[in-house]
Image: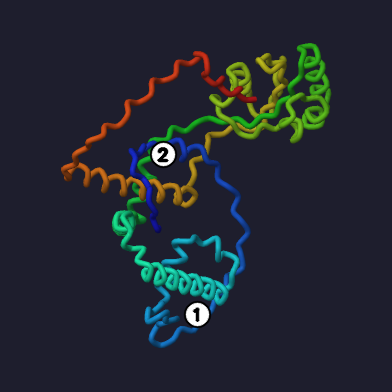
Amino acid sequence: MTVRLPLALAALSLVLAAPLAAQTPAPSPAPAAPATAAPALPTPADGILARVQGIEIRQADLDAAEEDIGGQATAQMNPEQKREYLLSFVIDLTLAAKAAEQRNIQGGPDFARKLAYYRNKLLVETLLNSETAARVNEAEMRKIYDEQRARVTPEDEVRARHILVESEDEAKAIIAQLRGGADFATIAKEKSKDPGGAANGGDLGFFSKAQMVPEFAEAAFGMQAGQLSEAPVKTQFGWHIIKVEERRQRPIPSFEQVRGQIEDFLTRRVQADLVQRLRAEAQVERFVQPPRPAMPTIPGAPGTPAPAAPRP
């Protein structure tokens, strides 16, 4: 993993339980046809791709340029176009740099300080990449996964449909229709005032108890799979008719499903450990103190944003 600054220089949280528990396994994609490796481009025997006023340009220079300008610029190019684009870029860069030297731009008052800054930046990026390569590995990632998986408490989930209407009488009439054999999804599309739910037959998908307003959650989690609510359920949004489709314990994603997140987390932790260790071992004198933290905002005080409306 290539690392760029700034990356993980702040304090890290070790709370992975929520991300591990919050994801539902995605359906496996259909297997793709095996990709054919692109043939290697011919390279001169001495490895020199161009020479600009005596300066040799090699593939490593093109790689550095691609890393600097980003892969999006060349993402849609074939190998020949990509190499030509990067080679032209490095040639122009070299020509412009030589022109700048001839004008003695490097002798300006700010140049040396900027050069020192970018030299330090490159040194640190290289150091962090080296530290990451040494300490971010399969064994460490699996160790973090196992530790966090052990901390996850299985949580019950319900998959339910609902129909939301404005009055209790209307809700009771709909319950009577459903008990008489009417199709729940059809009535939800026709009569529910929840636009998101109506579009898919009132299906809310799987949810935990904490994700719903209390009255709705208590009713839904008090029912069994296939059960229709005996009476309408009143919430701040109106009157609900609920049908529970399934009950389950929230599945924990596999290591492969969260591998990228764990690698990113471990990379940041490794980098932060390194920086903290360097700070602890160094003598640093600060002549400008950091600002005091802002006072916390009191909930409900003027100017405090209102909380988002809970589901459903």
- Which image quadrant is residue 96 in? bottom left
Relative to 112, say whether 253 is above or below.
above
Residue occupying image coordinates x 17% and y 45%: 282
Mark nearer the viewer, 2 or 1: 1
- Whether residue 121 is situated above or below residue 226 in the rendered picture: below
Residue closer to the observer: 305 or 154: 305
Tell me the tag on residue 176.
none
Query: Looking at the image, can residue 132 be seen?
Result: no
- Mark 2 and mark 1 lie on one chain; the one further toward the N terminus is 2
* Residue drawn at point x = 74 percent, y = 29 percent: 195
Q: Residue at x 66, y 15 (%)?
A: 236
Q: Which residue is mark 1?
A: 40
- Outermost residue on the bottom side: it is 45
Q: Residue at x 66, y 28 (%)?
A: 244
Mark 2 surroundings: few (<14), some (14-19) or many (≥20) residues within 10 A:
some
Q: Amino acid at mark 2?
A: Leu
Element carrying mark 1: loop
Q: Give left or right: position of 200 versus 305.
A: right
Front residue of 179/270: it is: 270
Q: Which residue is mark 2?
A: 16
Query: Residue 174, image x and y in percent?
Result: 80, 20
Residue found at the far front of this picture: 103
Q: Is residue 20 above or below residue 65?
A: above
Position of the C terminus, as image quadrant, is top right
Compared with 244, 127 (above or below) is: below
Distance from disc 2 to disc 1, alpha carbons, whole Å, reads: 42 Å
